[in-house]
């Protein structure tokens, strides 16, 4: 009967191995066929590749950098040019105002050369004056042959028609008169030295009087030489309550009255040509009610206006009865149309009166020695070509550097892609070269680790398939052999026969249950029924279940636990299974006379965990095998003898069960002295009363 079983084992073993080899050959052919049927992926087009994207981003960054640099340069240059132009405009306004003052005070341009040269020296610019027919009057150019003047003049210097923009900048924003006649052009209204001196003494007396009254005031002398009193502050009406009579300063002198009469005649002549009545002009060139004395073109006095004492030639309606007023001084009807006509005639009369006292209009040219009037930014075709060339060079260098860097970056990625595709096609995993410690190098190192891990998993998978086949084949072969022997009449179905078959069936069921538990744990569907566990009682139960086997092996099995033991919440059935697997493994590898100890305790750290130790005095585990003790179907004894090892799934099931409880399992061993397995399980905090 043993020969029949042995023969059957041999036949079944060869048949099974033969099928396995056939299956392996078919599998290898299938993989080779699969590799032929799976085409290699074509290289990505440049627009979708990492290199293409890197080049596009680099070119975009370079273009944006060039554009930003050009924009900043243009803005900076434009700002500098605008600033220089603003400074030049201020200097031009000062030049214009100085020459305008000269024209307002002199009837001709004779002697203006010294003034022009001084202005050119101060401003560092070329200043030239010509008549309106472009005949030279003065030029600051120092060259033997002066450069030609530009076709457009910078300004026209005419005290009777002032450029309000330049005049406003040149006079610190005070502007000009409404009729555009320079206020410094006073003509016949200019006082003689004697009149000016007499009025100045009178003004000084009035200022002294006002100061004694507690009113601060100053004497201001106008362009005509007439002094006037200016009250300091914004309330000139305060002078009315004093005994300081300012009327003496408001009375026109003989020369001023004569000039005012002449101006009135010119204005009346203009009005009569329009069929309008004549007017009597006041000293401030207003008409109607008399006003304080102010030379035409000068600012009015900052004192209350006092009516004139109505000198004989210029009576006003308020100072004389209507029946005594001569017809020539009758004030016309005050309407908007009449006022506009009077204002126009007065302006024309002033221009006619002053024309012989001021210089004739002249053209003013302001520029540099080269002849340009204002600095500018000349973007010539040559400069444009240089800028475009520099931008193209920057782009080319950027793209070249990007190509070089991109090629170095993409090369290891191509190697990684090729290795990954070969692994997908079933070829042996291979490592890729690690170029450095940068991101790509670390990616290559991680890939190599993954490839090595995959190779180990593949070897474990193959070994697991072989181990499962071996573990299942042995009890099945024994069962088949016994049944065939009984069928052939070589064995009697007595109780021993049935017991042997039952033993093999139980072993087969045990292997299948272990595989099922591992599969459930891997899938995360391992069911647990946690409850309160008294750890000392659980260890005692496990020890009692393995006591008989330990006694047969000559091994002492002992339990040490704290009383009443740490609090623990777990599935008691699964926890007994895990501890039982450890005890069974320890008893199996402990020689006769050895000892296996079960202990449960709480760590000194007091972190709420519970430690369960299973310690044996067995043969120990070599250091090189210790990392693999929890692998499936792993055995330190490679012969896989039933006498020295079980199915190889016990410790793997222990790890899965402990992890399902939220714990960990560790193993330490000293070869020749024994091993210690420690379960670290989360405990429960006792609730208060």
Image (cartoon, helix red, strand yellow):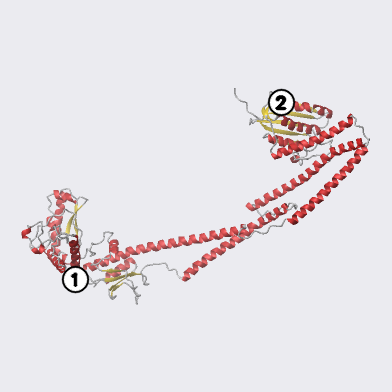
Q: Which residue is mark 2?
A: 536
Which of marks 1 and 2 precedes in the sequence?
Answer: 1
Q: Which mark is residue 287?
A: none
Query: Residue placed farthest to the left in the image?
Result: 324
Label 1 SS: loop
On the rendered structure, is 599 left or right of 398? right
Q: Which residue is mark 1?
A: 356
Q: Let me know if residue 243 appears in the view.
A: yes
On the rendered structure, is 361 left or right of 687? left
Give above or below for 418 relative to 357: above
State which quadrant residue 652 falls in. Answer: top right
On the rendered structure, is 81 left or right of 509? left
Give above or below for 156 relative to 58: below
On the rendered structure, is 463 left or right of 218? right
Q: Residue at x 70, y 27 (%)?
A: 535
| Residues at circles 2 and 1 in contact by the CB criterion of under 8 Å | no
Query: Residue placed farthest to the front in the image?
Result: 487
Give above or below for 339 relative to 207: below
- Of residues 274 and 101, which is closer to you in this image? 274
Q: Quadrant of the C terminus?
A: top right
State which quadrant residue 408 falls in. Answer: bottom right
Q: Position of residue 73 (x, y in %)?
A: 46, 62
- Of residues 99 and 316, which is closer to you in this image? 316
Q: How far is disc 2 from disc 1 in space, using C-alphas?
A: 132 Å
Label 2 SS: helix
Q: Position of residue 120 (x, y in %)?
A: 32, 68
- Of residues 171 and 508, which is closer to you in this image? 508
**Is label 2 or label 1 in front?**
2
Please rate how many residues cluster around mark 1, counting C-alpha atoms within 10 Å: few if below 14, some from 14 to 19, many from 20: some
- Of residues 408 and 569, which is closer to you in this image? 569
Q: Position of residue 281 (x, y in %)?
A: 14, 62
Q: Let me know if residue 670 appears in the view.
A: no
């Amino acid at each position: 009967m043993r020969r029949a079983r042995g023969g059957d084992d041999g036949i079944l073993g060869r048949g099974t191995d033969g099928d396995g080899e056939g299956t392996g050959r078919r599998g290898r052919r299938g993989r080779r066929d699969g590799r032929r049927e799976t085409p290699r992926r074509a290289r990505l087009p440049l627009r979708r590749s990492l290199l293409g994207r890197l080049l596009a981003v680099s070119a975009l960054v370079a273009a944006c950098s060039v554009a930003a640099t050009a924009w900043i340069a243009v803005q900076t240059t434009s700002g500098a040019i605008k600033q220089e132009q603003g400074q030049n405009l201020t200097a031009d306004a000062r030049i214009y105002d100085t020459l305008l003052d000269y024209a307002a005070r002199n009837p001709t341009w004779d002697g203006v050369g010294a003034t022009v040269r001084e202005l050119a020296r101060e401003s560092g610019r070329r200043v030239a004056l010509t008549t309106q027919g472009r005949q030279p009057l003065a030029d600051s150019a120092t060259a033997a042959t002066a450069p030609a003047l530009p076709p457009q003049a910078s300004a026209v210097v005419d005290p009777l028609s002032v450029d309000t923009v330049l005049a406003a900048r040149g006079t610190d924003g005070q502007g000009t008169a409404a009729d555009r006649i320079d206020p410094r052009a006073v003509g016949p209204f200019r006082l003689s030295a004697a009149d000016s001196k007499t009025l100045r003494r009178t003004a000084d007396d009035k200022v002294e009087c006002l100061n004694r009254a507690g009113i601060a005031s100053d004497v201001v002398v106008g362009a005509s030489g007439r002094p006037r009193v200016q009250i300091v502050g914004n309330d000139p009406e305060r002078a009315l309550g004093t005994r300081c009579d300012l009327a003496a300063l408001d009375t026109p002198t003989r020369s001023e009255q004569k000039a005012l009469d002449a101006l009135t005649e010119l204005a009346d002549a203009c009005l009569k040509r329009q069929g309008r009545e004549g007017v009597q002009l006041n000293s401030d060139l207003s008409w109607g009610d008399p006003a304080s004395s102010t030379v035409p073109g000068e600012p009015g006095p900052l004192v209350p206006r006092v009516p004139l004492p109505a000198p004989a030639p210029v009576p006003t309606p308020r100072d004389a009865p209507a029946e005594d007023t001569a017809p020539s001084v009758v004030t016309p009807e005050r309407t908007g149309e009449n006022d506009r006509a009077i204002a126009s005639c007065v302006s024309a009369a002033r221009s006619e009166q002053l024309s012989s006292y001021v210089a004739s209009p002249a053209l003013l040219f302001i520029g540099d020695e080269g002849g340009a009037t204002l600095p500018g930014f000349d973007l010539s075709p040559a400069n444009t070509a240089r800028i475009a060339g520099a931008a193209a060079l920057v782009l080319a260098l950027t793209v070249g550097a990007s190509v070089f860097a991109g090629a170095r970056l993409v090369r290891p990625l191509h190697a990684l892609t090729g290795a990954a595709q070969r692994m997908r096609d079933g070829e042996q995993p291979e490592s890729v070269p690690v170029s450095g410690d940068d991101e790509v190098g670390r990616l290559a190192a991680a890939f190599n680790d993954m490839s090595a891990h995959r190779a180990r998993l593949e070897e474990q998978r193959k070994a697991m398939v072989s181990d499962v086949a071996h573990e299942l084949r042995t009890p099945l072969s024994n069962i088949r052999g016994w049944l065939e022997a009984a069928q052939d009449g070589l064995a009697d179905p007595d109780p021993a026969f049935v017991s042997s078959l039952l033993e093999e069936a139980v072993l087969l069921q045990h292997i299948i249950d272990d595989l099922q538990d591992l599969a459930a744990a891997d899938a995360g569907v391992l069911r647990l029924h946690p409850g309160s566990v008294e750890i000392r009682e659980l260890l005692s139960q496990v020890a009692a279940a393995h006591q008989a086997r330990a006694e047969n092996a000559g091994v002492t099995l002992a339990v040490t636990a704290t009383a009443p033991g740490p609090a623990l919440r777990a599935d008691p059935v699964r926890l007994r299974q895990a501890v039982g697997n450890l005890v069974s493994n320890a008893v199996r590898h402990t020689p006769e006379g050895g000892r296996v100890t079960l202990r449960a305790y709480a760590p000194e750290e007091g972190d709420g965990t519970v430690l369960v130790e299973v310690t044996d005095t067995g043969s120990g585990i070599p250091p090189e095998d210790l990392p693999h003790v929890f692998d499936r179907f792993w055995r330190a004894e490679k012969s896989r003898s039933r006498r020295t090892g079980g199915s190889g799934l016990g410790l793997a099931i222990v790890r899965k069960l402990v992890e399902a409880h939220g714990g960990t399992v560790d193993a330490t061993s000293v070869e020749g002295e024994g091993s210690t397995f420690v379960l670290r399980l989360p405990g429960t905090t006792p609730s208060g009363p």
